[in-house]
Image (cartoon, grey):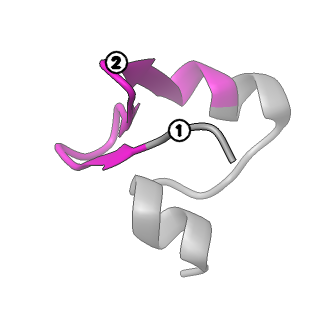
Amino acid sequence: MDWFEALTGFPEGDYAETQRRLSVVDKRLRSDATRRSYGVGIL
């Protein structure tokens, strides 16, 4: 398991598949594989 899978709950695939499985809701990154979310913002 790499860092991406540890955070999102699924292995990183091609761009379109990875993008489909992630979303940003109320400034939080959410994965369809877990109930976890992470705050995101502007760097």
Which amino acid is tagged 1? Gly
SS at badge 2: strand
* Residue type, numbered disc 2: Val
Q: Residues within 10 Å of mark 2 (few under 14, many from 20)?
A: few
Residue 21 belongs to magenta span? yes
Residue 32 screen position, x and y as percent: 35, 31
Q: Quadrant of the N terminus?
A: bottom right
Q: What is the magenta range?
A: 19-39
- Identify the residue position indicated by label 1 in the image: 41
Q: Position of residue 34 (x, y in %)?
A: 25, 46
Residue 4: percent from left, percent from top: 59, 65
The vertical placement of 4 against 34, above or below, is below
For image coordinates 74% across by 45% down, the residue present is 13
The residue sitting at 47% across, 22% down in the picture is 23
**First reached walking from the N terminus: tag 2 or tag 1:** 2
Q: Residue furthest left?
A: 35
Q: Quadrant of residue 31?
A: top left
Please state if 38 lies on the left or on the right of 4 as rendered: left
* Drawn side of residue 27 relative to residue 18, left or right: left
Of all residues, the one furthest to the bottom in this rendering is 1
Where is residue 35, by image quadrant?
top left
Separation of residues labelled 2 and 1 (CA atoms): 12 Å
| Residue bearing the label numbered 2 | 25
Question: Is residue 29 rendered magenta in the image?
Answer: yes
Image x and y of residue 33, in percent: 33, 42
37 displayed left or right of 7: left
From the viewer's side, name the closer residue of 33 and 30.
Answer: 30
Look at 22% across and 49% down and name the residue there.
Answer: 36
Foreground residue among 38 and 32: 38
* SS class, disc 1: loop
